[in-house]
Image (cartoon, grey):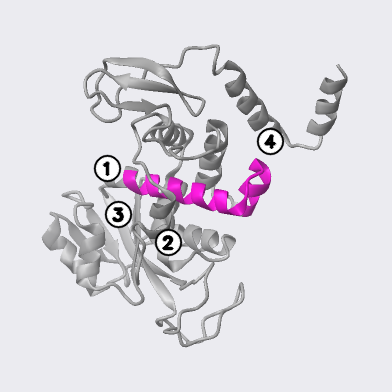
Amino acid sequence: MKDIKKAIDILRDFSKEEILIIFNTIMESVHSDKKKTELYDCPYCSGKKVIRYGKKHGKQRFLCKECHKTYITTTNTVMAMSHQSKAIWDAMIDDTINGNALSYSEERLKISHQVAFNMRHKILLELESITSANPMMLEDVSELDETFVLECYKGKQLPDSVERPARKHGAKAQKRGISNEYVCICTGAQRKSKVIIKAVNRAKPSTEEVAKVFKDHIADGTLLLTDGLRSYSILETLADCSIKNVENEKTSFYNLNTVNNLHSVIKKQYEFYRGVATKYINRYCTLFEYMYRKTDISIRAIKDGMLRPGSAIRYSISDVKRYGLTII
């Protein structure tokens, strides 16, 4: 009883969320040996003839009778090669999609900055994979426009090729107007919440860049509203759509309010993060897409897709450092 009272006294200093994580972790540990782990289809061949095959690093191991490969409960999940529990990963996915800062997750989950960084970027890579497998299609009435954010070398020294001193948080660009200090982000927003966000270069997007961002993402019959930038005219050759310049329109229907609201969300989150390293910008663009249209149902689906064996792509820490970096 004395030990229990000491534990309760210690837990009084924790928040409800932290206590829940501790409880879930303890329950996972206590019941891991008492209950039979669910049999999952083979992540390599999708075979269903699977048997339990002992333990590996304290986790249930399985043997596929069809391809004769073994795997464990974290194989091909976002948790692969991680020492953190499922409860920690579950909470980290919530923090990522809700736009919380890394420092908040570190303090709440009691993990180091490097662990939190690696977990965050593994989740971002998985979100990119989900988006690639289920491409977004803009339909009905959609608005296209671009926004600009300051380039950022957060986490590293400025390269010799950059001819400016390092900026402090909140500092502005040295040059006036749109310059090579800004990264261009192309955005498309359907008036029913579907959005596409992609960083392309350091200036107004060219026809080739617009085509690269929106090709196979515009449904036939879509009305595209733009501010008159000529580069968007290429889209009429890629899909059976029509383009309307709203720059001089006076009616309430023809406007870019939806996409401008999206720009506000992007810039607000960008400032909240105190900048995002430009090489990672497109990972965060994918995150901004999910943040803008998130629902409880979509978050549950994302978690199931990342945490269920065989349903995710296996990304390593080396992938976090090298895979799909934006060079602009």
Residue 112 is a magenta residue: yes
Pointers 3 and 2 in contact (C-beta within 8 Å): no
Pointers 4 and 2 in contact (C-beta within 8 Å): no
Q: Is the residue marked by circle 1 packed among few (<14), some (14-19), or many (20+) residues within 10 Å?
A: few
Which of pointers 3 and 1 lies earlier in the amino acid sequence? 1
Residue 134 seen in this snapshot: no
Q: Position of residue 282 (x, y in %)?
A: 38, 59
Kind of residue indicated by mark 2: Tyr
Kind of residue indicated by mark 1: Ala
User: What are the residue bounds of the magenta stretch?
Assistant: 103-129
Q: Residue at x 44, y 79 (%)?
A: 181
Mark seen at residue 280: 2
Q: Residue at x 61, y 26 (%)?
A: 24
Q: Quadrant of residue 211?
A: bottom left
Kind of residue indicated by mark 3: Ser
Q: Position of residue 302 (x, y in %)?
A: 42, 36
Q: Quadrant of residue 108?
A: top right
On screen, residue 128 versus residue 89, left or right, reads left
Mark seen at residue 142: 3
Kind of residue indicated by mark 4: Glu
- In three-dimensional space, the C-alpha distance between marks 4 and 1, rounded to whole angstroms, equals 34 Å
Pointers 3 and 4 in contact (C-beta within 8 Å): no
Which of pointers 1 and 2 lies earlier in the amino acid sequence? 1
On screen, residue 141 versus residue 99, left or right, reads left
Which of pointers 4 and 2 lies earlier in the amino acid sequence? 4
- In three-dimensional space, the C-alpha distance between marks 3 and 2, rounded to whole angstroms, equals 27 Å
- In three-dimensional space, the C-alpha distance between marks 4 and 2, rounded to whole angstroms, equals 29 Å
Instruction: Determine whether the residue tagged by mark 4 lies in a helix, strand or loop.
Output: helix
Residue under pointer 4:
18
Pointers 1 and 2 in contact (C-beta within 8 Å): no
